[in-house]
Amino acid sequence: MKHIGYSIIIPTHNSSSYIEPLLLSIPDRNDTEVIVIDDHSSADELSLTRDLLLKRCFPNAVILSNSGKRGAGAARNVGIDEASGDWLLFADSDDIFTSRLSAALDTYLDSKSDLVMFRPMTQANSLHATRTQEYESTYDRGILEEVGYSIAPMISKLFRHSMIIENGIRCSETLLSNDYMFSVTAFAHAHNPTIDNIPIYERVVRQNSLFNHTHSLDELMIRAEIQVEVRDFLCARLQKETLRRVTPFTGPYLKAALNVAGPIGVWRLRKIYAGHGLPIMRNPSIKKYLRRILRINKRNPLSGGISPESGEN
């Protein structure tokens, strides 16, 4: 029976117009299988994607279909269950692998690590290069816990399949941030995790992709809920100083909620944070910043007075 070393898992939804570059970037290897999970695309889109996969003539490839639209996290979970490789490698349908992938797969096939984290890379003209620069700075510092706990995306990483299965690690089945908890939990359970500065994956950010999407207030709340879930997980495992370094600052969420929905957005975010014991709204500098922008006084929700929803004391 043929031994499968690597399973490359690709969730897709109506992606036929941009998945071909990704498929072309995957090396032809007898020890690698390609699993495409279609998340309820239209019949025409599914047919086109299947044709592109067949055209690529991989030695081992399959396309699976969700019965309804369940999101990328659920699609990845299907791929994890179906995979037969020793290692799992995830890709988004609009990104590409670099030419250095095959050499990296040769290097780590018999590795004793449970997790290998490769340097992130984004196209130079990408609208999202700033975040990747932040990730690269984290890699440059070379502190293992910072890389493992603060680099949220699961792409550009090799996960030992048995470690994922044995610990019941799954993607969140939410529209957004569905890989954050997966990445953090995998790092927490991984034996001998490794950093490799070779880039094997290139992020391609389209104008209308989720990675570059202007979120609604409800979408921001989903991200915030995942953020505090991760923080709760880490609080039980890390010392306070390490926790401070690896937990994302809540300020960007506050500013985004303010921009999207004004005081109502800040109030809803405050309730999420307060429910998890986050002291962010007691931080004097942040209270001062929000008061200045919102032009509110001491009877506002940030100091425990009026609720924007009720308008009452």
Image: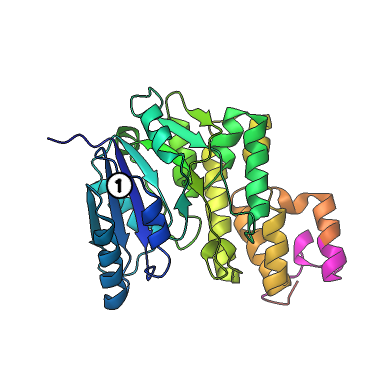
What x and y, as percent, mark residue 125?
64, 59
In this view, the residue in front, 158 or 49, is 49
Frontmost residue, 307 versus 222: 222
Q: Position of residue 164 (x, y in %)?
A: 34, 38
Secondary-structure class at tag 1: helix
Q: Which stretch appears magenta?
A: 290-309
**In the picture provided, is 267 more to the left or to the right than 231?**
right
Q: Is residue 216 above or below residue 31?
A: below
Q: Residue furthest left?
A: 1
Quadrant location of residue 220?
Answer: bottom right
Magenta segment includes 296: yes
Tell me which amino acid carries mark 1: Ile
Please say whether residue 169 is visible from this viewpoint: no
Q: Is residue 83 visible to the viewer in this orientation of the structure?
A: yes
Q: Residue drawn 53% across and 40% down?
A: 199
Q: Is 2 placed left or right of 264 in the picture?
A: left
Secondary structure mostly seen in the magenta stretch? loop
Is 139 included in the stretch rendered in magenta? no
The total number of labels drawn is 1
Image point (34%, 69%), residue name: 69
Residue 97 position, x and y percent, is 45, 48
Q: Quadrant for the C terminus, please.
A: bottom right
- Image quarter hosting the N terminus: top left
Image location of residue 268, percent across then percent down: 63, 65
- Quadrant in the rendering for residue 139: top right
Up/down of 273 relative to 213, above or below: above
Quarter of the image where one finds residue 144: top right
Mark 1, Cα crowd under 10 Å, few <14 / some 14-19 / many 20+, is many
Instruction: Name the residue tied to disc 1.
Output: 80
Depth check, front residue: 182 or 64: 64
